[in-house]
Image: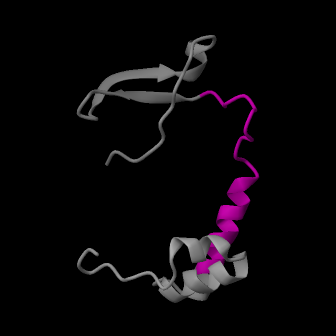
Amino acid sequence: MQKGVPKSPVTLEEYGAMDMAQRRKVWLEISDISEAEFEAHMAEEKARETVVPKVGTMAPDFVADVLDRDRKKTGAQVQLSALRGKPVGIVFGSYT
């Protein structure tokens, strides 16, 4: 275990078997935010779900920066709609 990282009160198997009320209790137990802040965050996440594209629907068009092998911006951009008809793999993540 890494120094300074607290031990989880449950195993992944236990967590996977929990219902949402049980998970909420664990989240609040290990979180450094208040219950009100937690509830506000969960409400915000739930609201975001209404605008997330559903699996199997057409992806919304967007423009993305092209990165080099060192994950630095190249100055080039690519627009998803310009790739229509071509296979496209998209990896979402933070490279900062």
Find residue 67 and report its horizontal and vertical position in percent: 33, 29
The magenta stretch spans residue 62: no
Residue at position x 34%, y 45% in the image: 95
**Residue 93, placed above or below residue 23:** above
Q: Which of the two residues, 65 or 16, is positioned nearer the viewer here?
A: 16
Q: Residue furthest top?
A: 85
Colouring of the image: one colour
Give the image location of residue 8, x and y in percent: 44, 81
Q: In the visual, does 73 lie left or right of 31?
A: left
Which one is nearer the viewer's eye here, 22 or 60? 22
Q: Is residue 88 above or below residue 45?
A: above
Compare residues 45 and 17 and report the one nearer the observer: 17
The residue lying toward the viewer, choosing from 25 and 10, is 10
- Residue range of the region highlighted in magenta in the rendering: 38-61
In the rendered image, which quarter is residue 3 located in?
bottom left
Number of dots carrying numbers = 0
The residue drawn where x is 56% and y is 14% is 83
Relative to 81, does residue 30 appear above or below in the rendering? below
Verify whether residue 43 appears in magenta: yes
The part of the image, by quadrant, that contains residue 88 is top right
The quadrant in which residue 71 appears is top left
Q: Residue 91 placed where, x, y %?
A: 47, 36
Residue at 32% in and 24% down: 75
Q: Residue at x 71, y 54 (%)?
A: 49
Taking 7 as reference, is 91 left or right?
A: right
The image quadrant where one finds the N terminus is: bottom left
- Residue 41 % position (x, y): 61, 71
Left or right relative to 44: residue 90: left
